[in-house]
Amino acid sequence: MLQYFIIYLVVINLIVFLLMYIDKKKAKYGKWRIKEYTLMIVALIGGSIGSIIGMYTFHHKTKKAKFFIGFPLILIIQIILIINVYQDFIK
């Protein structure tokens, strides 16, 4: 079970990292953009690390508070949830 969870986290974080790259490229050229809502949802479902890495790697969304505060906040909440679930699981 743990291996599937880890695979899921790797995949979802790679996806959101690529979404941040694609959105940055589209922003540079004035093309259709990925909705901010979509980026936040993908972070919420496990892609917070990829979101943060993508945000700073591509210097994308770094001036918007909902991202430079939101992504780390989501990560902290996810870590707390994982710790709580793990503690309940090992009891």
Image (tube, rainbow, N blue to C red):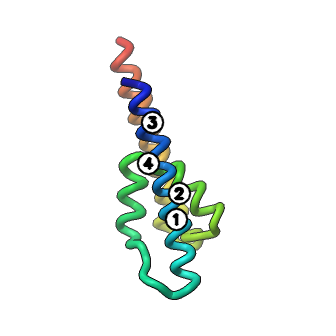
Which type of secondary structure does the marked residue at label 2 adopt?
helix
The vertical placement of 53 against 81, above or below, is below
Residue 62 horizontal side relative to residue 67, left or right = right
Where disc 3 sits, the SS reads helix
Foreground tag (3 vs 1): 3
* Residue 72: x %, y % from top left: 52, 52
Instruction: Tell whether label 1 touches label 3 (CB within 8 Å).
Output: no
**Sequence-first tag of 2 and 4:** 4
Q: Nearer the viewer, residue 18 or 56?
A: 18
**Residue at the location (40% across, 23% down)?**
86
Q: Position of residue 42 (x, y in %)?
A: 39, 56
Residue type indicated by callout 4: Ile
Q: Quadrant of residue 38?
A: bottom left
Q: Secondary structure at mark 4?
A: helix
Q: Which mark is residue 17?
A: 2
Q: CA distance from mark 3 to mark 4?
A: 9 Å
